[in-house]
Image (cartoon, grey):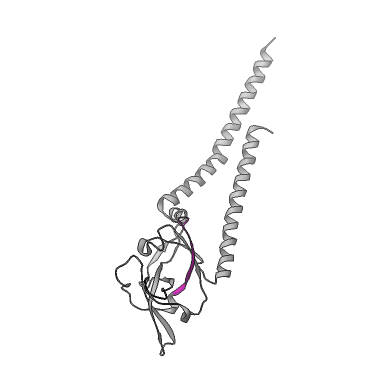
């Protein structure tokens, strides 16, 4: 096997491994959605509004499908302490995910009050960030806006996701794809041509020796 053929083989192996990793992440995400009964089973904390309970860059695990009447309400120092929920931004804002795709913006705050409306048949919640001095300005949130309840977290791992969603992260992905294409269609053919030319020169030199 020539050096160029070996490089091509390694390149193909890397591409296959990359595809397997992407496929595994997708399958894992779909499995979590089914298990936790929500479209957003994992989310990265993007703001310091819940410090020190949740820090920027934490990954939170969200469980949906629960009875909203069972969501506890109360401040940090109350008994019981209010549950932390994830809900759609009532202002209707969006956030950029990967590339040019957008999703509705999500907010993760603690429930400090709740009430039931007999007319609408829905629960309503007031929320506040642990690091904020006052309740959220949008007032009461209907249970239809609730994505789920936070049931776990992994510290700092979310920084990877936040970076990949940033301009710098997307530029890095684009650069890696360009490098892979350049290696396959430019660098390897040039290398193969140089190796072939060198071999021909050596053969010519050998023929000229008497």
- Say how many tags the image has: 0
31 versus 82 height, above or below = above
Image coords of residue 51 (percent x, y): 37, 62
Name the residue at 65% across, 36% down.
6
Image coords of residue 109 (percent x, y): 39, 69
Image coords of residue 102 (percent x, y): 44, 63
Is 86 on the left-hand or right-hand side of 11? left
Quadrant holding the N terminus: top right
Q: Is residue 153 magenta?
A: yes
182 versus 60 height, above or below = above
Name the residue at 46% across, 47% down.
172
Which quarter of the picture shows residue 72? bottom left
Quadrant holding the C terminus: top right
Stretch of the chain drawn in magenta: 146-157
Q: Is residue 44 magenta?
A: no
Q: Residue furthest top?
A: 210
Image coords of residue 9 (percent x, y): 65, 40
In the depicted view, which residue is nearer to us: 80 or 123?
80
Q: Residue furthest bottom?
A: 119
Name the residue at 67% across, 32% down.
2
Magenta span: predominant SS is strand
In the depicted view, which residue is nearer to us: 67 or 164?
67
Name the residue at 43% across, 84% down.
122
In the depicted view, which residue is nearer to us: 173 or 28?
28
């Amino acid at each position: 096997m020539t050096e160029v053929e070996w490089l091509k083989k390694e390149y193909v192996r890397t591409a296959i491994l990359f595809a397997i990793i992407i496929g595994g992440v997708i399958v894992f995400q779909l499995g979590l959605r089914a298990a936790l009964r929500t479209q957003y089973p994992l989310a990265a904390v993007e703001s310091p509004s819940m410090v020190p309970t949740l820090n920027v860059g934490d990954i939170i695990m969200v469980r949906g499908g629960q009875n909203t009447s069972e969501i506890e309400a109360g401040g940090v120092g109350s008994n019981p302490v209010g549950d932390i929920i994830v809900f759609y931004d009532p202002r209707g804002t969006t956030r950029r995910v990967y590339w040019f795709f957008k999703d509705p913006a999500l907010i993760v705050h603690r429930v400090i009050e709740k009430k039931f409306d007999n007319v609408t048949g829905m629960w309503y919640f007031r929320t506040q960030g642990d690091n904020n001095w006052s309740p959220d300005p949008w007032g009461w949130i209907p249970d239809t806006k609730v994505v789920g309840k936070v049931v776990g977290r992994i510290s700092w791992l979310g920084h990877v996701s936040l970076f990949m969603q940033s301009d710098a992260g997307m530029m890095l992905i684009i650069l890696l794809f360009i490098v892979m294409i350049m290696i396959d269609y430019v660098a390897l053919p040039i290398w193969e041509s140089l190796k072939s030319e060198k071999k021909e020169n050596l053969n010519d030199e050998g023929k000229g020796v008497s």
